[in-house]
Image (tube, helix red, strand yellow):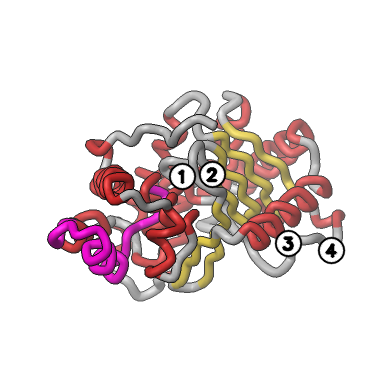
Amino acid sequence: MPGPKPLDPSSSPRAMLGAELRHKRDEAGLTQEELGSPLFVSGSFIGQLEAGTRRMQMEYAVKIDEILGTDGYFTRNCEAATKSKYPDHFAEAAEAEAIATTIKEYAPQLIPGLLQTKAYAWAVCRAYQPTAPEDVIEETVTARLERAHLLDHPTTPLLWVVLDEAVLRRKTGGPVVMAEALWHVAELIRKHRVIVQVLPFSAGGHAAMISALKLMAFTDAPSLAYIAGPEMGLLEDGPAIVARHALAYDLVGASALSPQDSLALIESVAEDYANEDQP
């Protein structure tokens, strides 16, 4: 079996911590499971810290310094590695998203952040925070649009999204904003940069009626499922939970329109919004 993928410590503070953790653990002669045991976490969790797909929390940094005898190195550097421009409940997911090789998402209510236009993102953030100052909304929208630069790479990550038809029909920001937002999604599809399907209302009940779904796969770390709610977000790496979310996503995709028919519907609804705005 090939060894773990070399990390680039210069890519981020979290990658630096991960590379150093792997080095010090190997130097101490400990397996990932042996280091994880006194931390009450799995060996795969340690692997995710080393791969940079998980953020190192301060409680773990302190304990790791004790176990590996690293003289406070991880404690001192943990704060810098956990700073983020994203809200605390989403920061770890955003950072994992940035190094994922594949992202699969079912969106029941709104266009996912990676596919949003500025006007659409503004409308979403304002609806979520109706009393927030303008500069707070602007900061949130800017961070969201910066995430979309992941799609500047021609092939990675592979992004496969299933949009509920409600996403197309919910007039977020008005007809002009919706027309622009849907044309943007259509353009990314036509450029073969993303795969998008639409789950039509005619599909009836389906496997993900309870919530959104987001799955992320990585080169050298276990897949993650992201569970989100108002002011909360949770990354799950338990094989049973990830497998259940993957099954739900596959079932939703099986009930959705084909990518070709989905594109036709997206463009048709965008055209309807554009015409709605005409005198």
Image point (38%, 50%), residue name: 95
Position of 247 relative to 275 (above/below)? below
Residue closest to the far bottom: 131
Q: Nearer the viewer, mark 3 or mark 4?
A: 3
Q: Amino acid at mark 2?
A: Ala
Q: Quadrant of the N terminus?
A: top right
Where is residue 176? Give x, y as percent: 53, 47
| Real-space CA distance between mark 4 and mark 1, rounded to the nearest whole angstrom | 30 Å
Where is residue 103? Give x, y as percent: 56, 43
Q: Is residue 251 visible?
A: yes
Q: Which residue is mark 2?
A: 181
Q: Nearer the viewer, mark 3 or mark 2?
A: 3
- Left or right: residue 235 versus residue 9 is right
- Left or right: residue 74 versus residue 29 is left
Q: Amino acid at mark 3?
A: Ala
**SS state under label 3:** loop
- Left or right: residue 269 versus residue 39 is right
